Image: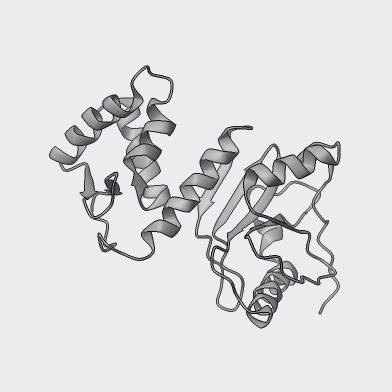
Amino acid sequence: MMKRDLAIIKDLERFRVMSRNDIADIHFGHLKNPITNANIVLKRLARDGQIEVGTDFRPYVYFPHGSKMKRNSTKIPHYLELVNVYKQLKKYAEPKVFTVEVRYEKGLCEPDIFTIFKGTPFYIELQRNTYSQAVMDKKIKRYESLYYSGTIEKEPWQKARKVFPYIIMISDTRYEIKSDVLRVFQVPSIHDFMRSVAGEKREVRREQPRVISKRLV
């Protein structure tokens, strides 16, 4: 199996599902005819049972072999949006880490994405639906619980100076977020986040994440 084939399979396992166009952009974008080349490779991988195809969407969507996700699942558009976040980040720099659906112990937050981008750790929340302020307050409380849990200090990416990731909230709705320990950016897209950072005339990495305090809530 070619190295590119393995990379496509690895991405499908990471993202859960990807569209034909996503795969073409990420793995064939350097070629003259990325869509045509992607179609040829994906057809072969599906034929050989290396990946699975969903025909309820246009363009078709692809799953890792053995995926239990329903081919018409209502969660598919959400996962495709997570892929789009990754593609937006790649326009500025390749994320060192990009993990989908991070899970900690019960009662703590469940970020859509954890990434290390330009040397800085981020959680990314994709909020395309409008939530009540009460629901958002509970989400922020779960992030604060994670902050004070000690879990993040043990992560393998941590250095001597233990920090808590920034939170990027991608949403067209702006919420009133109050926290003494979290740094939350509310933006419609990653491109808007990068523009806001550039507008403040600093690189993302120059404003360091908050050092984790031992103070209890």
Instruction: Indicate left or right for 100 with 196 as reference.
Output: left
Query: Depth check: 52 or 217 in front?
Result: 52
Q: Residue 180: where, in percent of width, then height?
A: 85, 69
- Residue at image coords 64%, 32%: 92
* Residue 165 showing in the rendered view: yes
Q: Position of residue 100 (x, y in %)?
A: 49, 54
- Between residues 74 and 95, which one lies in front from this camera angle? 74
User: Residue 95: in sight, yes or no?
Assistant: no
The quadrant of the picture occupied by the N terminus is top left
Residue drawn at the location 74% of the way across and 46% of the way down: 159
Q: Say whether residue 146 is left or right of residue 77.
A: right
The single residue placed furthest to the top in the displayed view is 32
Coloring basis for residues: one colour
Left or right: 180, with 111 as reference point: right
Give the residue at x 40% y 42%: 11
Please provide percent x and percent y for residue 79: 43, 55
Indicate whether 42 appears above or below 51. Answer: above
Q: How many labels does the image show?
A: 0
The one nearer the camera, 171 or 153, is 171
| Quadrant of residue 174 within the rendered picture | bottom right
Q: In this view, does 128 lie above or below 91?
A: below
